[in-house]
Image: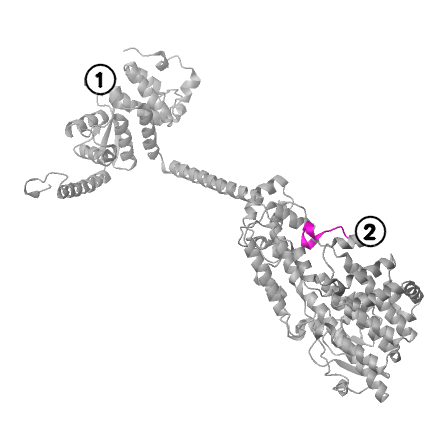
Amino acid sequence: MATENEFDVTAANWLTRAYYTPVSDAVRGQLSARLDIRRDIAAANLPLPLSKLIYSVCRRTRLWRGEKSDVARELIAHFSDGLAAGRAADELAKDFGPVEQSARLIRRAKLRNRPLWWRSCRFGIRLVLATLGLILLVYSVLAARFYLGKPEVAHNYWHEINAARRVDESDRAWPLYREGIFKLGKDQMDRDWMAEGPTGKAWNKAIEMLDRHPESLTLFREGAKKPHLGLLLGDPSDRDAELATGQDSIFSKQSADDNEELIQALLPAIQELRRVARFLQADALYAANKGDGSAALADLTALVSLSEQAFQPDACLVEQLFGIAIFGLATDAANRILTESPQVFSDTQLRDLAHRIAAYRGGAMSLDFGMERMMFDDLLQRAFTDDGHGNGRITPDGINTVIGLLGGPRSVEHLLSPYNFQGAPAVLAKVIGPGVATQVGSRKENSDVYHTVLDEMIEAHQGPPWLWDKADGKIVERHNLGSSQGPLARVRYWLPSLILPSIDPVFSAAERTIQVRDATEVAIALTLWKRRHGQWPERLDQLVPELLPAVPPDRADGKPLRYVVRDGKAVVYSIGADRDDDGGRSTADPTSAVVASFGPISAEEQKRSNGSDHDGDWILWPPVKIKRAETQD
Amino acid sequence: MRIERELMRGAGPVAVLKLLESGSKYGYELVEALSRASDGVLDMGQSTLYPLLYNLEAQGLVKAEWRDATATRPRKYYALTAKGKKRLAHDTAQWRAVERAMRGLGVLQPTLGGATG
């Protein structure tokens, strides 16, 4: 039985011999090459087909050398026994079965015989690889889902808002204001001229400007008589009118048809209406200074009406705060006239003024968050996909759009910011982004949270401010939107946490306006009382009911508005920011006593206020030189 | 008659264990004994037998030992372990239960007196 050369290992070099030598032999300095199955096969002197079969099976098992050697020796013994029993080599080879299958089964069985540590490692590695594979698969699906998601801007909120604001052309004030604004050109009533009023050094400049624009003032007063402002968003007719008068750069080129992001809606008209309001305020002071009570009353009434007009249907908070500020200009001017030249008004005119101010917005100061909600819903449709049932998932385009609007980098990287990944390379951000995006709540979740939190915030500010549940922070925390929340929660309600409006300042601004309105009503009643009695009343309740239906509350604590006569002058005041009655003593800086945030304050907060800059009262009438118009404007 | 692979998968291990009950045996001896004792029904290729033996070894049912049985070549002998004996007893009982069930179903012919051994 000859063997082929391939099993002849007698000429094997030392490296090969070393490779097939067990460690135990090697440490004894013997290059035994005991694990070389070719040597065993050659030594067995089997027929070539059987030798090849054994070698092929063993080689294909891909087992350790020691294991292969063991299998080879056993198969050698097996075939040797077969031959010894008189079986032919071909017959034995045939009975053995397929080489591939045999090698596979032997390998599988031998692996089961390996040490526990090896099998544990193998299982662990397989588990890790399988897990990684599964993660990779799932992540790939998520990444594809994320990057393929596209928002669908199906709704034009500009048109919806404009539809609510559209009124009969003859009822629109805006075209008259606009015409008056064009006639003003670049002229602007400087706030500094107004601060000192007719007694100030710069007042002459204000008078010159007023005298230059009688037509504009007439148009403004006419506009104020209209029932509606009729100011539309992205109205191309504003641009057309502007160009027709040869002016430019006042109004934006935005068009409602373009359906840009609603939050991007520019409100240049608000800035222009502010000019209108300052002209009317200056003219009221000018008229009073000239002794023209009728003109002054007309200007004050026009200011109040302009303020009311600002509360259009679906007015955004900016527009509403503008309206509040304009009303502040009206009451500020009225209070100054009542202090400096009360004789300019007849009793009837004072009553008319009192009624007009009392009737401001029907006596209510409600705020509407309709447009804020629309702005949010508009962002939702630009950030999330739309499944047609009000739900969807976040999209890369949506993230870019929203963050771009808010001034951040237009990148999926933004989602990683709660995880402190800002410095991560863009590629890494793109890889991680889809994973983080899975943590962003659905469109419906984000929508529900936004509207629920807003509802709760509004609810917490209902009723008089001294009964408010000052729970803005608690509401935000309760809905996992606060900055103290972990990154997971902040990412989940990513959009609401970014753009939920700050409610308290808005409601406090409205309360300040109510307080000033009430004080103006009291000032008018006091003026009328003094005319009748030649002196100030001792108490405010003496004005009731003849001149005042009731003493209005101090909105800082709900008790009747405070009043004192000092040095022959009546002082109407609120206990102010420190919620402590200082007997009508103003702070060194009167603005610091103005209640910035209404609602109950804790004893600790009050203690901190006492002795601080806030220690003092908020003097409502007579107006102190605190440039309140600037503060509120 | 050669039996189906699936059936062989169940019968093979218990058959090998049974053969080893009488004493340790080496591979070729087992092949021959299996063929002889089962009248060729349980003939299995060596490509199946050796993996089967390695599996039984991995389960601790048999233990293997190299012995120099002859002057010319060593052989690897397989012997039942205590665990293997228990398994054989357990599997034997199961096969008997199967046999009874098959007889009950008429798949196998009933023995005289209904005994099943």
Q: Which mark is residue A174?
A: none
Q: Nearer the viewer, residue A184 or B27?
A: A184
In which quadrant of the rendered image does the N terminus of chain A lie?
top left
Q: Position of residue A98 (x, y in %)?
A: 30, 24
- The kind of residue tagged 2 is Leu
Give the quarter of the image for residue A340.
Answer: bottom right
Above or below residue A5? Residue B69 is below
Q: Where's residue A2, x and y in %?
A: 29, 10
Say which element carries label 2: helix
Up the image or down, A307 lies above or below A243; here it is below
- Residue occupying the far left of the picture: B113
Residue at which label 1 appears: A83
Mark 1 residue element: helix
In the rendered image, the vertical position of residue A169 relative to residue A363, given as above or below: above
Quadrant containing the C terminus of chain A in the rendered view? bottom right
Specify whether residue A250 is in view. Answer: no
Q: Which residue is mark 2?
A: A243
Q: Is residue B24 left or right of residue A286?
A: left
> Sequence-wise, which precedes: disc 2 or disc 1?
1
Residue A468 is left or right of residue A620, and the answer is left
**Mark 2 belongs to chain:** A
Q: Is residue B13 magenta?
A: no
Count of numbered labels shown in the rendering: 2
Q: Which residue type carries mark 1? A: Leu
Specify whether residue A554 is in view: yes
**What residue is shown at x 25% (from left), y 29% (from top)?**
B49
